[in-house]
Image (tube, rainbow, N blue to C red):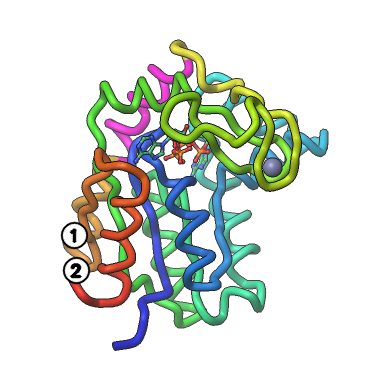
């Protein structure tokens, strides 16, 4: 059976979406489309768009739908998405999910699988408080669960690791509320569409990835 390559990865903040996405896109050779990464790149570039979205992100609030949908529309229309894509952190609201359905219909690349990484709240807090990220290449580490080879240095590109501005207890509370109220209903949306697959995100990083690969290879659904 052919691999599934039109994919969404969902889950609460800190569930491990970025960590698993890095591996999935390498294994399947598809582009990783992370709205969070795109927003952080815009912020780092100092553009007026970056300044605009920073106001929301630093407080843990969602960026407005129209802005978010537009950057995804532009990204999905690029030729490298022709043979598949992994959407990470998008959609996060029902209007985004509906806009995405329409968009994918237009370009005839419907979602084949929506992976939901399930993790409970205590684990999320532990994961987010220990998260360290590379500001240059976006790689994500953890002070206990995924230590870099050299303390505070990115394995991939050698940059100094940082803690995300929105990984504070205050922002996390706002983000978890946004997840509960706006993003969680999407689980049902994709279940109804028949593409939802639940993944136990409480397992270690390698085991979670094994489960995902088995699903994508069509061995388990
Ligand atoms: P996390 O890793 O915590 O799930 P992301 O890196 O995906 O977070 O996103 C970081 C922040 O960027 C979010 O808290 C939100 O402010 C903004 N953001 C990312 N994706 C979206 C989206 N699809 N809609 C609205 N805001 C978004
Ligand atoms: P998300 O993109 O969903 O916000 P990340 O992939 O950035 O999540 O992971 C959040 C933090 O948890 C990171 O520090 C990461 O190294 C760590 N992490 C990811 N997956 C696991 C796992 N299965 N077990 C333990 N820690 C994990
Ligand atoms: Zn790096």
If the picture is divided into quarters, which one holds ligand 3?
A: top right
Q: Which residues are magenta?
A: 171-183
- Verify CB contact (< 8 Å) between mark 1 and mark 2: yes
In the rendered view, does 24 fall on the left or right side of 1? right
On the rendered image, what quadrant is the N terminus found in? bottom left
Measure the alpha-carbon separation of dots 1 and 2.
5 Å
- For disc 1, the marked residue is 191
Q: Main secondary structure of the magenta part?
A: helix
Image point (44%, 60%), residue name: 99
Residue plotted at (68% across, 47% down): 156
Using the image as rendered, state which of residue 143 and residue 85 is in the foreground.
Answer: 143
For disc 2, the neighbor class at 10 Å (few under 14, some 14 to 19, many from 20) is: few
User: What x and y, as percent, mark residue 138?
Assistant: 63, 43
Q: State the image coordinates of residue 201 (x, y, percent, origin top left).
A: 27, 43
Q: Is residue 26 above or below residue 110?
A: above
The residue drawn where x is 20% and y is 54% is 198
Magenta span contains residue 100: no
Dot 1, how many residues are within 10 Å of its Cα: few (below 14), some (14-19), or many (20+)?
Answer: few
Q: Is residue 114 left or right of residue 53?
A: left
Picture quarter with the C terminus: bottom left
- Kindly identify which numbered label has been placed on residue 194: 2
């Amino acid at each position: 059976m052919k691999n599934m390559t039109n994919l969404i990865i969902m889950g609460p903040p800190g569930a491990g979406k970025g960590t698993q996405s890095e591996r999935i896109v390498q294994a399947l050779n598809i582009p990783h489309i992370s709205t969070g990464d795109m927003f952080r790149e815009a912020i780092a570039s100092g553009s007026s768009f970056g300044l605009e979205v920073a106001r929301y992100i630093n407080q843990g609030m969602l960026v407005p739908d129209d802005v978010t949908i537009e950057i995804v529309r532009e990204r999905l229309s690029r030729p490298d998405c022709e043979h598949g894509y992994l959407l990470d952190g998008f959609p996060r609201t029902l209007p985004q999910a509906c806009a995405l359905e329409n968009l994918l219909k237009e370009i005839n690349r419907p979602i084949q699988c929506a992976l939901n990484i399930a993790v409970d709240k205590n684990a999320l807090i532990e994961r987010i408080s220990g998260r360290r990220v590379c500001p240059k290449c976006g790689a994500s580490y953890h002070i206990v669960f995924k230590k870099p080879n050299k303390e505070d240095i990115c394995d991939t590109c050698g940059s100094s690791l940082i803690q995300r501005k929105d990984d504070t207890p205050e922002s996390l509370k706002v983000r978890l509320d946004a997840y509960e109220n706006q993003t969680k209903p999407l689980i049902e949306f994709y279940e109804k569409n028949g593409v939802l697959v639940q993944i136990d995100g409480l397992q270690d990083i390698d085991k979670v990835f094994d489960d995902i690969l088995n699903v994508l290879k069509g061995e388990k659904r």
